[in-house]
Image: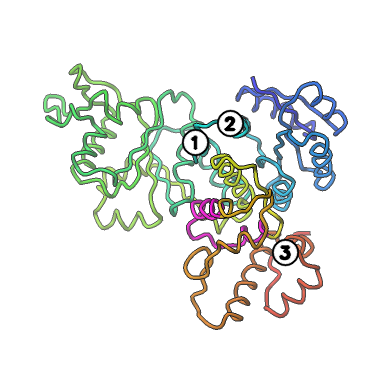
């Protein structure tokens, strides 16, 4: 059983937190102050979970622990209503940041992931321990709503259609549903329908042994073999990518299997129950693809009993600091370099960029930054700007104009995004931008930037 020291957890939350962590095989040592926490850590080295409800005071506690125990692994728990604390947690060197309500499996996954990073396992490759269940960052209101929908979907065994742009976490969302559902004992099987030709896709889904006679005419059932993806997903989930690329004949077979929930196993010649949950990750314009007739209506109905929309990264900026930190630690581990930290200006810039490629683009940028660094632990604003393109990459200015005009547009959009991230709080925004409040007010007037929403 893993152990973790939880510093600052409110007494009213401890019983539920202990239950959640216990389900994930994590035991808790409670600490109400830094002195007691340091005493316990001297007796037994373990990760620290730090509740940031007290804001600056809690962060000071984190710095005290870091001063005396530089190698201690530290995580933070934040309230989604205070996105600024997520940024502060990342800047304080937290390995990961969790939003309330705290999920035990999420914490256990993070501990296991960080231990693999620390072990410097030579078999560790990019993504080797990434994107396990519940690894969706949900500090933003948009993602908290998604997490609620995922939890509800997990209580049913109906088909789920997950819509979103590339890089929005469609497959991670599907894996989350799979992990949360009670009674699911089977595997999570992924099939990319665009990666096969017609015969190969048919064989992958149903098995090569089932190709000679697709349909059992005596009972009206489809035939599958033990070596098919459908058989491999028994009791679990089959997740379909690019389902519109599947040929009509394969779509028809798949729709029949999902309708009948039964098939003939060719090796035995007997019918078997197909307890399989179908999910599909699709683009936002998928409804138009269905209307064009590229996806059979009967298959669409089986896949879309539950529909979940994944928001793009630019619509959930509160999640960017923690997600960037997650990617950064993964990248450093895979490249066998010491963990890097983002400076406040660098993190503010990353949080403000448009991210048209979503999380994939974010990870690619960070990998380029880490690869291009010349030693040191810190990543500054200039390190990020070196890899930010103004001609179709991370930042796009389509209106033309002089360099001065382009710089003004970028500065205006950047300041607007930081103000939005900090909900109109001038002091917090100025701190994130690395300028004085008076300078920020002057720039807002010059660039005609609105303060936006305010939260007192």
Q: Position of residue 387 (x, y in %)?
A: 55, 61
The quadrant in which residue 14 appears is top right
Asked whether disc 2 touches disc 3, contact meaning CB atoms under 8 Å apart, the reply is no
Q: Nearer the viewer, residue 288 or 347?
A: 347
Residues in magenta? 346-368
Q: Earlier in the sequence, mark 3 or mark 1?
A: 1
**Residue in the image at 81% along x and 29% along y:** 31
Instruction: Give the position of the N terminus as an image quadrant.
Output: top right
**Residue 169 on image: x %, y %:** 48, 46
Disc 3 designates what residue?
433
The residues tagged by marks 2 and 1 sit, at their Cα atoms, a distance apart of 10 Å
Of label 2 and label 3, which has the lower sequence position? Answer: 2
Residue furthest out toward the front: 374
Closer to the chain start, of discs 2 and 1, is: 2
How far is mark 2 from mark 3, CA to CA?
A: 34 Å
The C terminus - image quarter: bottom right
What residue is rendered at 60% in x and 25% in y? 24
> Which residue is painted at 26% across and 58% down in the image?
292
Which residue is at the front of the view, 216 or 418?
418
Task: Give neighbour class at mark 1: few <14, some 14-19, many 20+ (Cα, 10 Å).
Answer: few
Residue occupied by mark 2: 116
- Residue at disc 2, secondary structure: helix
Q: Nearer the viewer, mark 2 or mark 3?
A: 2
Query: Is 354 part of what is drawn in magenta?
Result: yes
For residue 92, above or below residue 9: below
Assign a secondary structure to mark 1. Answer: loop
Callout 2–callout 1 Cβ contact below 8 Å = yes
Q: Which residue is under mark 1?
A: 128
Give residue 41's position: percent from left, percent from top: 79, 26
Along the line of sight, which residue is nearer the eye, 103 or 436?
436
């Amino acid at each position: 059983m893993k152990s973790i020291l939880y510093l600052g957890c409110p007494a009213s939350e401890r019983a539920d937190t202990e239950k959640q962590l216990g389900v994930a095989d994590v035991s808790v040592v409670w600490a109400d102050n830094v002195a007691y926490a340091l005493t316990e850590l001297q007796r037994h080295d373990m990760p620290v979970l730090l509740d940031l409800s007290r804001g600056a005071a809690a962060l000071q506690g984190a710095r005290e622990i870091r001063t005396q125990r530089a190698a201690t692994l530290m995580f933070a728990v934040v309230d989604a209503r205070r996105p600024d604390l997520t940024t502060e947690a990342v800047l304080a060197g937290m390995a990961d940041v969790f939003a309330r309500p705290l999920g035990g499996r999420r914490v256990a996954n993070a501990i296991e992931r960080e231990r693999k990073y620390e072990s410097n396992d030579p078999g560790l490759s990019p993504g080797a321990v990434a994107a396990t269940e519940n690894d969706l960052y949900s500090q933003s209101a948009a993602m908290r709503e998604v997490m609620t929908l995922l939890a509800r979907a997990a209580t049913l065994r109906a088909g789920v259609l997950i819509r979103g742009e590339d890089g929005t976490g469609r497959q991670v969302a599907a894996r989350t549903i799979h992990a949360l559902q009670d009674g699911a004992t089977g595997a999570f099987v992924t099939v990319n329908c665009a990666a096969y030709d017609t015969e190969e896709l048919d064989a992958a889904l149903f098995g090569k042994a089932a190709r000679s006679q697709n349909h059992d005419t005596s009972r009206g059932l489809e035939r599958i073999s033990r070596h098919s993806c459908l058989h491999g997903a028994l009791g679990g989930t089959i997740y379909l990518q690019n389902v519109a690329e599947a040929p009509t004949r394969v779509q028809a077979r798949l729709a029949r299997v999902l309708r009948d929930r039964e098939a003939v196993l060719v090796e035995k010649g007997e019918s078997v129950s197909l307890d399989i949950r179908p999910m599909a990750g699709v683009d936002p314009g998928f409804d138009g693809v269905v209307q064009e007739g590229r996806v059979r209506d009967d298959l669409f109905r089986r896949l879309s009993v539950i529909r979940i929309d994944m928001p793009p990264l630019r619509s959930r900026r509160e999640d960017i600091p923690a997600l960037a930190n997650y990617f950064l630690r993964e990248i450093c581990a895979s490249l066998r370099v010491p963990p890097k930290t983002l400076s406040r200006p660098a993190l503010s810039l990353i949080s403000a960029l448009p991210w048209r490629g979503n999380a994939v683009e974010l990870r690619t940028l960070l990998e380029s930054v880490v690869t291009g660094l010349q030693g040191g632990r810190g990543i500054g604003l200039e390190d990020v700007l070196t890899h930010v393109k103004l001609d179709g990459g991370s930042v796009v200015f389509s209106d033309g104009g002089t360099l001065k005009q382009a710089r003004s547009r970028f500065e205006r959009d950047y300041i607007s995004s930081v103000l939005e991230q900090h909900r109109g709080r001038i002091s917090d925004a100025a701190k994130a931008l690395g300028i004085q409040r008076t300078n920020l007010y002057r720039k807002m007037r010059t660039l005609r930037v609105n303060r936006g929403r305010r939260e007192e």
